Every structure is written in structure tokens, then in C-alpha cells.
Image (spheres, rainbow, N blue to C red):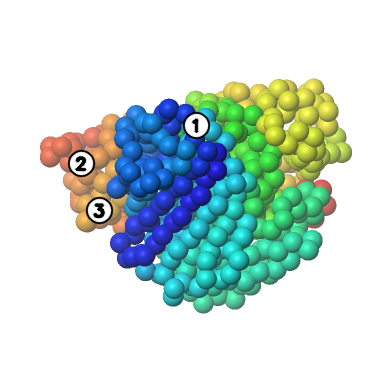
């Protein structure tokens, strides 16, 4: 079936995109079409059809065809002719890496939000035409440009999957580029940044050079980095020959924040190999309407979360001290999450659809991120491989070669462990599998000592274990850490904290309140709950220890 899409943006201030899909080659009584409900790489049902309106379906003579909505994002078209046109509007006013955003300044078009597909049909010879305000002068996308002149913007995709996998930035964004291995790499920057001394282009190029050399060459013809610098944004989404990055442009001048930016770039770029090509067998071909369950997101994101910091270190853009500070912060975060005791990496992966992207007040007590723990267990695996004269590179390259041998087929857990055993041994494979399947505590300190890396701890600190938020001058409890002082006292999420020992506490003062209290006495916390005053008794106990510093010797072979 041949598909041609036309996207028209004639009034960007309304945030509306008019989409027309022309289908040719229809030879069945009823045709089922859909708008995706989720985006590959972001495992949450986002129900993109909620932004669709003004749907109409016409035959080749312009006659309206009957159709019926059959599910939240699915429609059945009755008695279609050989050629039909489907027209609809999509409201686009959410600037994230997994949604579309259109206003007077630009258009960011995220495929799954916009492009209808046809169930049980392979769409071929896909063509996309873009129409937008003449003052917008630039288009950045991983799609193939087939425009015959610059007055008409036409692009092609080999398949519906490829179409969805190529986001589009349109406007007057800053653009630049460079070449690596003779391949063009395009840069598009939308948004504002505060003054800084960093060379984004040179640093991104260094990351591309380092990662591509590590992996043995680039696997694409060209690559596009689309970056949105916008207040309070952070994240990225990988694509086969492009990525979209979101970062607070005000923070580029602060070294610790710039390191986060560098590691974000490396993370999304490494996904070019790991997940967009090396992938769990369940993640492709995609079912865009329903959840695509897999228990292997520890491979997709865990391995990538280890490699982003590790490969950024390899670039020379961060120092070893800065690298180990990242690991320190990750370990401190990991040990602050009680959910690690109850949620394995495999269950965390499988439950991503209902847990990771939908956090609630008890999430930290019951779940663990496959990004965070996944990255740390691959750190342990790298350590174990170093002991036998190998490294994580041996595993990554073996996975890559396996993909090249069968590029259309994903990898199963069994196949992953067969590869791991080939480059290591039964013991390493068994221990790594245990870290995926169980919630047993991991001795990171002993593991790091093997490589001349020592951990220094801060003095233990007493805490109530409450996550609070200042809302209009009211100190509100957002969540409580399991088995903490606040948890044992019976504090609830949603409580308004008023006083300690009948003395009013201000929001800015409360976080350090315990240092002013006698450790041996019983104290009272006054809270409002549902408009009723509650007096909760608590004793100060269980100080929390965290890592102050990770020291490494120069002779470490890390």
C-alpha cells in the first residue's frame, strides 16, 4: 500500500497541525487505521489520539466515507475505494522529546503523535510533504530529503517504522554540523542558553568520534542531533539516525551540569547501537497500539547508563575524579531507595509501563529504576571482566557482531547469556544473572577495591525520611521513606507539617530540624491531615550514611 502524508502548519500560534494521509492500493472491504499510543524508547501509554480532532475520510472523488471508532486510537473505514484520503488535526503544545510542540517560534514534530498507520499492512514508498510559514527557513530531520527545489519540502521513508523514527525540527533554529568518517552530522539548537565557555559542536564531535571508534565505525549514512534548550527540561530520546535532547540552557556554564549534558549526549548517541540495532527480541517489530512488554530493559537502558559515563570518560571531556563523582552520586541514590530490596531488574523492566514513568508517593519504597541499578550492575560486570583480562568492550562488540549477523532479529535473554559465557565464564555469567533476577544486596565497595578504588563515607546523618514541598507557604509531605523516623511515626503523604514540639517550623528550617533536638528524647510532630490536627510521636534513630568520596589510584586499570 502506498502512503503519502502532507503536514500543514498555517497558523502555528493555534498549535494545530493539519495532517492528510493519501492511501493507494486498497483492495479490501474494511480498512483499519490507528494513531500510535506510545513511542519506542519511552515505555508509557501516552494516548496520542487525545489530541486528534476534525477527522474525516474521503474517497478519490471527495465523497465522505463512513467510519467508526473501535478503540481509543483506532478506526474502521467501511467500503473504502482504491484511493482514499484521511484528514485530521493534531493539537501540539507539549515540549518534550516524546511529544510534539508547535508555536509561533518553531515546530517540533514527533512522528507517533502525528502519523496514522494502517493495521496489518506494510506501507511502502512513503512520502512526506511539509508546508509551514515562509519565515521559517530550516528543517532538520533524519528523513531522506527528496525535494526537487527549496520551495517544496518533501521527504521519503522506507517504511512506516522509519517515518515514526525520524523527528522533525522546523523553524529558525541555530544549525551547524561536522563530519566523522566522511558522514555528515547535523546539529540543530532551539531555545536560549545563558553565556558559557563550552564548545558544544567540538564536544559533540568528540563524543561521536570516540563512541564510533569504540564500536568500529558508524552504522548510518547521516545523523541529526536536535536539541531543545528550555527551562527545567532534561532528557533524550534515541532514533536510528538521530536523537532529540532536552536540557536547561541556563545551566551550561556550571561544570557539574555541563557534565550531565555531555553524558546525556553520549547516552543517546550510544543508543544508535544499543536498542536501535542491538535490541531485545520483544522490541520490534513494534505494536504501536498496545504495550510491548520485555524484561530486558536492563540491557536497553542499564548497559547504556553505564556506557554513557564510561565513554564520556574515554573522550577526555571529563576527568577520572569527575567520573567517580558520578558513580558516587549514583551509589548514594541507589542506597537511598528502599525499593531496591523488593524490585529486581527484570521485574522493574517488565513493569516500566505502570511504574517507572508513573511514579507515585510510594514508588521509592517499592521499585528501583532499571536505568540506575542497571548501570551499576554493568559496572560490576565490567569489574569482573577486568579480572579475567577482558572488559565491557568485549561484551559490547560481541553483541554488535551478533546483531550484524542477523540484523532483523532481536536478542533473547538466553542468547545474551550465551554471548556473555563465550567471552567470560560460567561463574561471571551466573553472578550477573543473579543481579538481574534477585534483590540481593551488592557489595560495591569490595568490588571497587579490587581495582584500587576506595570509598570514604560522610559522618552518619539523622533524618526524618520525609520528602517535603513548600506549597504557598505550607510545608506539605510528598512521600515518606520506608522504615524512616517519619514512617514509624505515622506521617502520611499529603500531611501539612505545622510544628515540632509545639514550636512552629518554617519550610526552610525544617530540613535541618533534627540537629536541634535531643537524640535521647521522644518528640512530637504536629500536622494537619484532612483539616484535623494530629500529634505524632517520634524518636530519632537510624542515621543515614552516604558516600563522601570515591578515591582512585592512578594505577587503576579502569
* Residue 27, label in figure: 1
Of mark 2 and mark 1, the one earlier in the sequence is 1
Position above or below: 437 against 463: above
Say few, some or many: other residues with alpha carbon within 10 Å of mark 3 (under 14 / 14 to 19 / 20 or more): few
* Residue 180, label in figure: none
* Residue 471, label in figure: 3
Position above or below: 397 against 12: above
Of mark 3 and mark 2, the one earlier in the sequence is 3
Residue 219 versus residue 88: which sits nearer the camera?
88
Position above or below: 95 against 88: below
Give the Cα distance between marks 3 and 1: 59 Å
Q: Which quadrant of the figure has residue 301?
A: top right
Residue 141 versus residue 475: which sits nearer the camera?
141
Does the image show residue 330? no
Q: Quadrant of the N terminus?
A: top right
Residue drawn at 28 percent across, 53 percent down: 470
Residue drawn at 34 percent across, 57 percent down: 16
Residue 449 versus residue 113: which sits nearer the camera?
113
Amino acid at each position: 500500500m502506498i502512503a503519502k502524508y502532507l503536514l500543514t502548519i498555517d497558523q502555528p500560534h493555534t498549535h494545530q497541525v493539519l495532517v492528510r494521509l493519501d492511501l493507494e492500493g486498497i483492495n479490501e472491504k474494511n480498512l483499519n487505521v490507528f494513531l500510535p499510543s506510545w513511542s519506542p524508547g519511552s515505555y508509557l501509554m501516552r494516548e496520542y489520539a487525545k489530541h486528534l480532532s476534525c477527522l474525516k475520510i474521503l474517497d478519490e472523488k471527495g465523497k465522505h466515507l463512513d467510519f467508526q471508532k473501535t478503540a481509543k486510537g483506532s478506526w474502521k473505514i467501511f467500503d473504502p475505494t482504491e484511493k482514499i484520503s484521511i484528514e485530521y488535526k493534531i493539537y501540539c503544545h507539549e515540549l518534550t522529546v516524546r511529544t510534539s510542540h508547535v508555536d509561533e517560534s518553531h515546530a517540533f514534530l514527533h512522528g507517533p503523535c502525528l502519523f496514522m498507520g494502517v493495521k496489518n499492512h506494510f506501507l511502502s514508498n512513503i512520502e512526506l510533504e511539509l508546508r509551514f510559514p515562509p519565515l521559517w527557513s530550516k528543517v532538520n530531520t533524519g528523513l531522506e530529503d527528496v525535494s526537487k527545489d527549496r520551495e517544496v519540502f518533501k521527504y521519503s521513508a522506507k517504511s512506516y517504522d522509519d517515518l515514526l523514527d525520524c523527528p522533525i525540527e522546523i523553524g529558525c533554529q541555530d544549525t551547524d554540523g561536522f563530519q566523522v568518517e566522511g558522514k555528515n552530522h547535523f546539529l540543530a539548537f532551539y531555545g536560549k542558553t545563558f553565556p558559557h565557555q563550552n564548545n558544544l559542536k567540538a564536544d559533540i564531535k568528540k563524543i561521536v568520534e570516540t563512541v564510533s571508534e569504540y564500536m568500529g565505525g558508524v552504522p548510518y549514512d547521516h545523523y541529526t542531533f536536535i536539541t531543545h534548550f528550555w527551562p527545567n527540561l532534561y532528557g533524550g530520546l534515541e532514533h536510528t539516525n538521530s536523537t532529540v535532547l532536552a536540557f536547561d540552557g541556563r545551566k551550561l556554564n556550571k561544570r557539574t551540569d555541563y557534565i550531565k549534558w555531555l553524558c546525556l549526549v553520549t547516552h543517546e548517541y550510544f543508543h544508535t547501537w544499543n536498542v536501535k540495532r542491538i535490541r531485545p527480541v520483544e522490541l520490534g517489530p513494534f505494536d504501536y497500539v498496545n504495550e510491548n512488554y520485555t524484561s530486558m530493559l536492563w540491557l536497553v537502558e542499564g548497559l547504556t547508563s553505564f556506557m554513557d559515563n564510561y565513554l564520556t570518560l574515554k573522550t577526555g571531556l571529563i576527568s577520572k575524579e569527575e567520573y567517580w563523582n558520578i558513580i558516587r552520586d549514583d551509589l548514594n541514590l541507589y542506597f537511598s531507595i528502599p525499593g531496591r530490596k523488593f524490585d529486581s531488574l527484570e521485574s522493574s523492566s517488565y513493569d516500566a509501563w505502570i511504574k517507572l514513568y508513573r511514579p507515585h508517593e510510594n514508588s521509592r519504597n517499592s521499585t528501583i529504576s532499571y536505568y540506575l541499578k542497571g548501570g551499576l550492575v554493568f559496572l560490576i560486570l565490567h569489574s569482573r571482566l577486568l579480572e579475567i583480562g577482558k572488559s565491557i568492550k568485549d561484551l559490547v562488540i560481541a553483541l554488535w557482531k551478533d546483531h550484524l549477523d542477523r540484523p532483523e532479529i532481536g536478542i533473547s535473554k538466553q542468547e545474551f547469556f550465551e554471548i556473555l559465557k563465550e567471552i567470560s565464564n560460567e561463574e561471571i555469567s551466573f553472578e550477573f544473572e543473579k543481579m538481574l533476577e534477585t534483590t540481593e544486596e551488592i557489595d560495591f565497595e569490595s568490588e571497587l577495591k579490587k581495582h584500587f578504588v576506595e570509598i570514604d563515607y560522610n559522618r552518619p546523618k539523622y533524618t526524618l525520611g520525609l520528602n517535603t514541598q513548600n506549597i504557598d507557604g505550607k510545608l506539605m509531605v510528598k512521600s515518606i521513606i520506608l522504615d524512616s523516623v517519619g514512617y514509624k511515626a505515622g506521617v502520611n503523604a499529603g500531611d501539612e507539617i505545622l510544628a515540632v514540639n509545639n514550636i512552629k517550623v518554617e519550610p526552610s528550617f525544617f530540613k535541618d530540624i533534627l540537629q536541634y533536638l535531643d537524640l535521647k528524647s521522644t518528640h512530637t510532630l504536629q500536622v494537619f491531615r484532612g483539616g484535623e490536627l494530629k500529634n505524632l510521636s517520634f524518636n530519632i534513630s537510624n542515621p543515614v550514611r552516604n558516600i563522601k568520596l570515591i578515591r582512585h589510584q592512578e594505577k587503576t586499570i579502569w
